[in-house]
Amino acid sequence: MCGIFGWLTPGRGVARSRAADAVNTMRHRGPDDEGYLLCRLENGTATLAGGDDTSGDLQLPSWRDESCVPGADVVLGFRRLAIHDLSAAGHQPMGTPDGKLWIVFNGEVYNFPELRDDLEREGVRFRSRTDTEVILRAYECWGPECLHRFNGMWGLAILDLREAGRPRLFLARDRCGVKPLFYTTDDAGGVAFASELKSLLGLRDQKWRVDEVAAGNFLAWGRYPSAQAGGTFLKDVRILPPGCCAEWTGRDLKIRRWWELKADGDGTTGNEKEAIERLRFLLEDSVRLRLRADVPVGSCLSGGLDSSAIVGQVNQLLRDGRSTTNTARQHTFSAVYEQDGPYNERRFIDRVLETVPATGHYTYPDGERLAADFDRLVWHQDEPFAFTSVFAQWCVMEKVRQEGVTVLLDGQAADELFAGYRPYQWWFREMMRQGRPVGAWSEARAVARETGDKPWKHLLRGVGMGLLPDALVQSVTRAGYKSAFQKAAARVLKPGKTHALLEQVNDANSPESYPWRRVTESLEDHLRGMVTEFSLPRLLRYEDRNSMAFSVESRVPFTDYRLVEYAFSPALRGLKLKEGWAKWCLRKAVDGLAPQDIIWRRDKMGFGTPEAGLVQHLVRAGGRAEDPGGVAADYIEPGAMRRVMAAATSGSADKEGVSLAFRCMVFNSWSAQFPVC
């Protein structure tokens, strides 16, 4: 896990000091090593250079030495967090023996030992034990199609100098977008990329323009730019969408999709028993692969189904001697609170730890700590964020680093894959469209009985959506969506800032229109959107920034592409929501990995925090609760912000009011710390 950077300015020469600053802005992503490649595209001259954190054993010239590739118009930069082959052999940028291909790589390809065996059979000889070298040689042998062979998470860049006078840059991101890759281009054909947005912002003197639709959408009700459209909060910086790659051949950056989550997943069929067995095998193998490391590995534990299943699976692999990790005893990490309440999961966490030989570690997020860390938390996130749960995860990652653990397994993505958010209305709509009103009623009663939820409102909405024409449902939903946005915007935005967003809401081709445009889709389509476009990309962003802020590599077993594709196969259709239970098939598949009362918990609704108390403390501590400054002043009405903060401080704010206060403070902090206009 690392931070990568690249800047190509054909024929113009790169500002080396700015490039080095960009690389070292990400030092937290890779404190173990620093490396550069300096290159002239005109003649293909490429030389490795070092920085202040580069090992002297490598005997590399400094990037500051202007005699090293004078006039270089390419810089590739790298910060390393050593996970595999901790020796200097893992130094990046890494090249092929002939110096014609160079890679900077952030992430992990977990099946690299198997790929290495395949390449050795084709005559390839290796100089290290890293996955990076396997990726580079795989590209050399198989070209861009090598991506389909990788099981892992990555943002990577390969500079291809094999064809004289025709240099190429290849960029790629993993299927689910676990690892980020930002980029920007200029009018002269230049391109720059980085693992973090902030690393690109020092490449020019001018401020970067805020995307007003993204800003208004976030402030009004906490929505984010579209993952599939590659949007960010800045007009001139994009993010390579998940499952996409890009190629630059001297001027334009051409983006294409190399992986897509198909409607029928991997196409697998089978009976119920076979489906559950297959799901259990895939989860086990995903966890097994993600235990591969030459450093200590731990697990996140929230007390819910997903993380508890992973902890149980790790324990089983360790017990049976089928793990390649050097960790003898599992360590778990949890966020808990001093006071009992609906957000304190301590009793469930302790229940899991009664059944596995693991050492539990706890962190205690509170308002005082949030106020102290607030600006630093915002800076590390790169872009504004809407929930205090991000802070709780931040505290967990800091605890992981304090305990000397470098790799952490986490349970993100299971809710999106297996309907953990209880999207009943799509489920009921599907049954109505199939002519099963009795089945819909029966399932609604089962939900109430088994989980304690009362899904009657969802049932009525599902029935309505199932019986009424799609065009009518969309029209009614669009009208309601527009009205709700206008009310939300009026609470905080300056007059006139809502127009651009309302135009996007009306446009059926715009990502901003998805709440009304997608209201008539099937359950499977809804979940696929959660995986590829909405919920999961946001959660993976938090996961990456929080973990890397403390030089921790976070691995997400449920994003194994085999699990993702199988989750949408015909074999599991009808097994996600069943007998009143969300994630029914997953609960069945993990039987024996966690206590039954954890697997069949009635009250687990997702990771939550005592947001009202945290925000109240933050406002009172002055956590950017003053009148908006910088670009925030262009969007937030000062009088409205004062009213919002007063309500949050007094405790009179409703849930949305508390969330709005937090968003305003986050946006205010972000606009003060980043060079934006």
Image (cartoon, grey):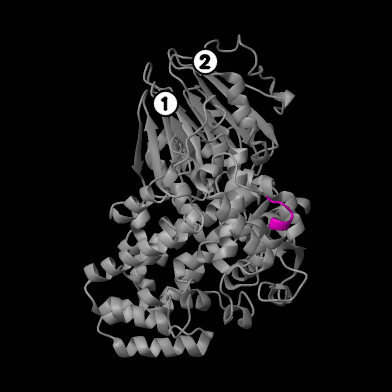
Quarter of the picture holding the N terminus: top right
**Mark-to-mark CA distance, 2 and 1:** 18 Å
Tag 1 or tag 2, which sits nearer the N-term?
2
Single out the mark in the foreground, 2 or 1: 1
Query: Whole-percent x and y of residue 93?
Result: 57, 29
Magenta stretch encompasses residue 621: yes
Of residues 635 and 400, the one nearer the viewer is: 635
Above or below, comparing residue 365 to residue 444 in the picture: above
In the picture shown, does residue 363 fall above or below 665? below
Task: Tell me whether circle 2 and circle 1 mark residues in contact (CB < 8 Å).
Answer: no
The tag on residue 72 is 2
- Residue 518 in view of the camera: no
Q: Nearer the viewer, residue 161 or 401?
A: 401
Q: Which residue is mark 1?
A: 186
The correct choice, above or below, for 26 with respect to 387 in the image is above
Please state which amino acid type lies under the numbered disc 2.
Answer: Ala
Q: Is residue 279 left or right of residue 34?
A: left
Q: Residue 21, percent across and down? A: 63, 27
As rendered, which of 205 and 8 lies closer to the eye?
A: 205
**Which residues make up the magenta segment?**
619-623
Q: Residue at x 28, y 81 (%)?
A: 432
Tell me which corner region of the image, top left, top right, bottom left or bottom right, holds residue 352.
bottom right
Q: How many marks?
A: 2
Q: Residues within 10 Å of mark 1 (few under 14, many from 20)?
A: few
Whether 26 is drawn above or below 421: the answer is above
Characterize the magenta stretch by its predominant secondary structure: loop
Spot the residue most to the front: 639
Residue 8 percent location from the top left of the image: 47, 23
Residue 564 in view (yes/no): yes
At a point 74% along the width and 23% down the height, the residue shown is 56
- Residue 230 location in percent, x, y? 41, 44
Circle 2 Cα neighbour tier, 10 Å, few/some/many (<14 / 14–19 / ≥20): many
